[in-house]
Amino acid sequence: MLDAILEALADHPADYGLTMTEIVALPKPLSSMFRGMVRRRTLNATEMANILGLEGEDMPLVLEHMLAKHLVDPLEDPQTHEIRYRVVLVHTRHRALKQ
Amino acid sequence: MTLITFHSFRRGVGRSHIVANLAGLLADSGRRVGLIDGNLRLPGLSAYVGLPEPQINRTLNDYLRGKCEIEQATYAITTGLGTASLWLIPASTNAQDISYATRYGYDIDLFANGLLTIREEMALDLLLVEMHAGLDEESIRLMAIADKAAIVLRHDQSDYQGTAVMVDVVRKLDGPIPLLIANELPRHYPTDEAITRLEAIYNCQVAGVLHHNDDLQITGSGLFVARHPTHPLTKTLQRIAENLLS
């Protein structure tokens, strides 16, 4: 599962954020996780790991990739100091046409 | 609170008329209902619910451009249906505002945050949001946080194809329940047959079907269902309102 998730993240062509169309088109369970993030506004690492079916050290690795591609933003809960993650949504994506 | 978004693949399918009247009927059933005109490109809900333009100072556009709080763009509506509790957040009908929204879009996260604020401030039971026609980032984003996404379609082959795409997207979002409302069916088309056919095509619930009715051309201020409480169209809309919540 980890390899499939990392491969899907690597295949994502942009290096900043996701459009809703891209979220819908992502393979499961990545798509499910981002959709859950949109509906619930934020998820913590445990909630993300549960949706992705990951265990142990796998989730930090996936998070590292998502943060590097600016797909999620970490937010600290001011009361509990828990780190939660919000999907970085972009409105449109303009790509140069291939020559 | 239940959030229901209303969409259509094409323009001119009667979405605003249906949404406005359903909001009035749902408020008349004792629920606290919020109604948002999310169609910033072709606004019109204020006219359907009978909110006079001179009474509108602030709109959804002002909120989305940071000019006011969302509560300041909220108007209590006199529905003509007893003591119904209905509030409208209108979109601006000012040409410059429409042009700005069309050209630059808006911060959909701010829109979503506004929905949450208004839900809490007004202690709403139901929030209905009418979105613009078509499928884009804004409409998909709103669908994604909705409990139900109602798609209005006309009895027309090209609209059938576009609606299939929209239903498919709602399904892929894996959260909102897709619902269909068919409008402008030919008078001779039996209701049960139309519902059975639509359910077979789209494999989702059909909240109701509305037949073509010339009486809709009768202009007047305010909700059709308040002006014509015994009209067959009002009865059909009442059934659709019940189905929306079932």
Image: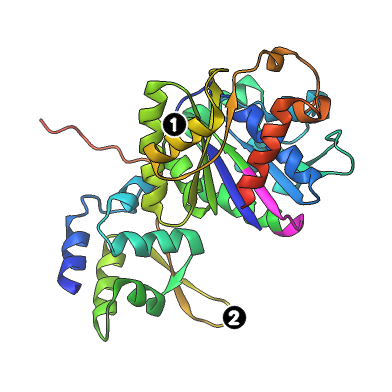
Residue B174 on image: x %, y %: 41, 56
Q: Which residues are magenta?
A: B120-128
Residue B180 in sight from this viewpoint = yes
At 75% from the left edge and 38% from the top edge, which residue is drawn? B24
Viewer-proximal residue among B3 and B122:
B3
At 67% from the left edge and 33% from the top edge, which residue is drawn? B236
The numbered mark at residue B134 is 1
- Residue type highlighted by circle 1: Gly
Residue B183 left/right relative to B92 = left
At 86% from the left edge and 33% from the top edge, which residue is drawn? B80
Instruction: Find out whether the residues at labels 1 and 2 contact each other: C-beta distance under 8 Å.
Output: no
Residue B95 left/right relative to A7 = right
Cα distance between the residues tagged 1 and 2: 41 Å
Residue A24 on image: x %, y %: 33, 51
Find the residue positioned furthest to the left: A99
Tell me, yes or no, whether dots 1 and 2 are on the same chain: no
Q: Is residue A60 above or below residue B119?
A: below
> How many numbered tags mark residues here?
2
- Residue type highlighted by circle 2: Gln
At 67% from the left edge and 46% from the top edge, which residue is drawn? B242
Residue that label 2 marks: A79
Chain letter of mark 1 equals B
Describe the element under mark 1 as helix, strand or loop: loop
